[in-house]
Amino acid sequence: MTIVDLTSMGEPQTEQQREINARLVSLQNEISSYCYQCAKCTSGCEAHKLLELEPHKIVALLKRGLINELVNSDIIWTCMTCMKCRERCPQRVAPIEILFALKNMAVASGKQIPGKYTAMLQSILSLGLIQDIQQITTRMNTTVKRDELGLPPLSKPTDAQKFQAAVMKIATEKV
Amino acid sequence: MTTHMKYALYPGCLMPTEQYAYELSLRESLPVLQVQLVDVPEFSCCGEPMKSVNQLLSLYLAARNIALAEQQQLDLYAPCAMCHLALSECKHILDHNTAMRERINTLLSAENLTYTGSQQVVHTIDLLYDHIGIEKIKQQVKHPLKGWKLAVHYGCHAIRPKEIGRPDDSEHPLKIEAILRALGAEPVEDYPEKLDCCGAPLLANLPESALTKTGQKLQAIQHHGIQGLVDVCPWCHKMFDARQTKAGETIAAKLDVPVFYLTQLLGLAFGLPAEKLGLHLNQSPVEKLTVEGGA
Ligand code: SF4
Ligand code: SF4
């Protein structure tokens, strides 16, 4: 089993899709009774001015059941996860949770994951962490790594196989 | 004083692989306040960076790390705001949803781990303000940061969502300013951009936009005539400090803002040597304050 099973490009993961879909449907029911389109979420949205994300419109589209359109749109990947929409909604709706579910659905349906997410996931699988120890440059232009600074060894899973097996189970599990 | 507060240091990914100044400075300055940090092997990513990809995977990773600390019967100290959110949210979910807890525990059993919910999770902000307290911090100050006019960046992940309990208030966080005052500095309690995002969450897929966010906030701080910025998250710090020059290029502005980890300032005020606090690792012009500021 490889990373392909866990992310895009492979077979769509039907079990996972079913689960995320159930999540989206319950979110849809919730917002149908609560969201009154005041757009307070959008007024404070960190991604609004810069990238034209409008969380209240995401909510409105989900309310109308346009899940496929949303899953296939690039706009869902502009959310900065600042959680202001969730915090400030007078009706306790959480557009950010809708966005997470939509992105999870995009991945589970085999859509290509944007940017460095695949590389990070690959690194978690092989190392347990999103990246390995980096050599960094000081302000005086010398280079150092963590051991040269007297820091103790990096904490990470030592039995990589066991760790990977568990992570892989999540990708394919049928619980 | 012999009573020690003991925590498992949960380093996460970013701090121990590149944001060394945070790790160095907290390992130096917290023991002065009788905090004992225990290194626990086997930790992995907290899961937060994977939330957009697979939320179940995030939850599993967070639970796995908490379970490792539970084995040692230690509370966790997560200096990264992202990690702290992942672990706190995982606790909140698994403590309230038994079905999910069982599901995660079935997965954890492959590594002989169990989540029980016995241990707590703290971040730098509540560790210093609520668990140690301002008075104890004040007692250790040897070189007050006199005249340092500083802005604080809390980081979205440290203060939201309120519902699950966060280290400070989601709209009017003021604990770090109180800590800075205890160190002798002059924090600016409010500035219009105080709650603006650092941009880091977009680094993975929209780096230009991420840097624009970073640059805009730094530029505003510069405009306000504030001398420096303080943060408490390796992601925020990576943006404001390591990427400051790039952020400036992105918004076509010359940025020149010294950026510090709160734990570095703690150490400076306690009279610890700058090198031990990793001040040579900051990429922003910190000497504008450390030299001219007289600390
Ligand atoms: S989600 Fe909340 S804040 Fe956004 S439009 Fe609906 S009710 Fe208003
Ligand atoms: S969490 Fe995302 S959608 Fe919500 S306000 Fe922040 S950037 Fe906008």
Image: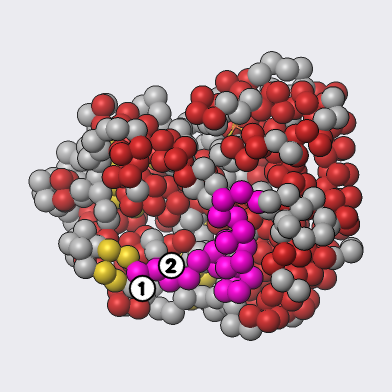
Left or right: residue A18 compared with residue B288: right
Q: Quadrant of the N terminus of chain A?
A: bottom right
Whether pointer 2 and pointer 1 mark residues with C-beta atoms closer than 8 Å, the reply is yes
Q: Quadrant of the C terminus of chain A?
A: bottom right
> Which chain is home to disc 2?
B
Magenta span contains residue A117: yes
Ligand 2 placement by image quarter: top right
Closer to the camera, A164 or B41? A164
Q: Which residues are magenta?
A: A113-135
Q: Which residue is mark 1?
A: A146
Q: Which mark is residue B1?
A: none
- Cα separation, mark 2 vs mark 1, equals 7 Å
Note whether ligand 2 is within 8 Å of mark 2: no
Q: Which mark is residue B17?
A: 2
Three-letter amino acid code at the position of disc 2: Thr
Q: Residue at x 21, y 49 (%)?
A: B286
Magenta span contains residue B85: no
Pinpoint residue B32: horizontal percent, then vertical percent. 32, 65
Q: Quadrant of the rendered structure where residue A151 is?
A: bottom left
Closer to the camera, B7 or B16? B16
Residue B77 visible in this rendered orientation of the protein: no
Closer to the camera, A23 or B251? B251
Q: Residue at x 45, y 51 (%)?
A: B235
Q: Residue at x 54, y 79 (%)?
A: B41
Are the numbered discs 2 and 1 placed on the same chain, yes or no?
no
